[in-house]
Amino acid sequence: MHLDEYIDDLQPDGEQRRRQQLAEEKSYEILDFVEDVEQGVAEAVQGDSLVGATAPSVFVGRSSYPDVSAGILSPVAGDADPEEFATSGEWYQQGLDIDNVLQYRTGLLNSRRAANVNVHDVWDGFVGTQREVAMADRPVDIEIGLSDTPEFDRDEYTNPAANAPSGPNARAESADLGENPHVPRYVEKTLEDDDWAAEGAMTYLYRRGLDVYDINRVLSVGALGQAQHRRLVPTRWSITAVDDTVGQYLRGTIRDAPSVDEVSVHVNEYMGNRYWVVLAPGRWEYELVEMKAPGSIWNPDPGGDLWMASASEGYAGRSGYVDETAGAYYAARLGVLEHLSDVGRQAKALVLREVSDDYWAPVGVWQVRESVRNAFDGSPGEAETFHGAVAEISDHLPVSLAALRRKSDMVAGVQSDLSEFA
């Protein structure tokens, strides 16, 4: 389908309508749900203990590194399957809206205690239990001894800021498993090999079918890498590390692949974000350009200017961390590379992300990853040239083509090169 017809037909398809309907059916005022969580905490905490099933989720903070906050996340609200509380691509498939995601996040009690990141031989006590919970592939019964009453900050939900709202938290004294966790054999294999570098272990787990969400948990609790280097990794860092490492592996799988033979445009919308993915013939090259509207969570002044950010890489990749677009860069790149690896091609890839003021609270880079992953469903729009495609898309962007050209190396015609990032 030619690009102009494709853009004209950009209406929600049946699957998108289904997700939207699900979101509408599940959506209700988040503060009403907060009251349910507070009641759930009261019911779940018996004396100074929390007893019940935990989703296979953990949290490692980054404040005061290398002395961090190590937490086990336990569902304390509603009667949903505990596994549903764990962040995964299923949230996209279920059509969860911002309210719905915050409800899941709000419904998790973070039982935490201070820990040093050096844990390569720690398998007892609270941190040892946290590590076993993270490696399990299903919920685990657990009893947690608490040293104080769970605290809840309602202001997080009425005035969401850059960090996504979270559930109540309490200091933990102890954690005891009520059953033996089920750990996949290939996760055990990476743990048992004391000489296996973390990057190779992550790639191995991905090739064995673990999604990046599962690998992130295992990395975060220091269960990957050479024994003497195993550390707790703050959750935010581990998410980006896994996206980057798996992305580098996938880039290697297409390094010698033939190029795509035509320009294609793929579009997806989710949670107030619209993603345009343009693939064009040529060797691998990638750029993410973000356009964040006034009044959105990352550009909160409704009377301000639209904010733009970009980052790119050439055939050889990058040697430095991305600052402007941060974790979104690696999450979007992963979705593009998975598609190209699946079809056995390489391409020049431009991702344009529009963030509208409908994106009123941050839910995490998982929505970037899943939106780009699913942008390749269905037939794309087609164009004669890369620049012709961008020119046609620009009529539907919140910025002019000239402004986009000033911000984007690819749109300006500048070829990325490894030396640019040295």
Image (cartoon, rainbow, N blue to C red):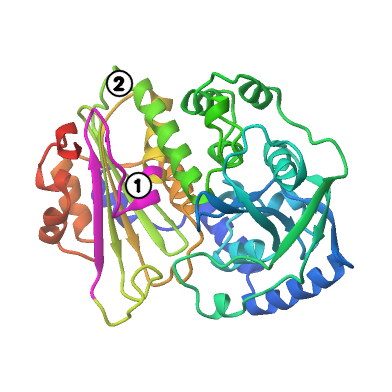
Indicate left or right for 20 with 106 as reference: left
Crowd class of label 2 (few under 14; some 14 to 19; many from 20; radius 10 Å): some
In the rendered view, would you say 371 is above or below 183?
A: below
Q: Which residue is drawn at 86% across and 69% down?
A: 43
Query: Which image quadrant for residue 71?
Result: bottom right
Residue 79 in the image, given as x and y percentages of width and height: 81, 61
User: What kind of residue is marked 2?
Assistant: Arg
Residue 204 in magenta?
A: no
Quickly name the residue at label 2: 255
Q: Name the residue under label 1.
A: 329
Q: Residue at x 54, y 65 (%)?
A: 98
Q: Which disc number belongs to residue 59?
A: none
On the image, the x and y values in percent for residue 380 come to 34, 41
Secondary structure found at label 1? helix
State whether residue 389 is above or below residue 186.
below
Q: In this view of the protein, can residue 26 be seen by the observer?
A: yes
**Residue plotted at (89% across, 68% down):** 47
The reply to whether discs 1 and 2 touch (Cβ–Cβ < 8 Å) is no
Whether residue 397 is visible to the viewer of this picture, yes or no, is no
The N terminus, quarter of image = top left
Residue in the foreground of this view, choosing between 54 and 47: 47
> Residue at the location (56% across, 68% down)?
165
Looking at the picture, which amino acid does disc 1 mark?
Tyr
Q: Is residue 212 left or right of residue 409?
A: right
Q: Is residue 272 above or below residue 249?
A: below
**Neighbour class for label 1 at 10 Å: few (<14), some, many (≥20)?**
many
- Look at the image and give the residue range highlighted in magenta: 305-330
Give the SS element for disc 2. loop
Quick one: label 1 or label 2, which is nearer the N terminus? 2
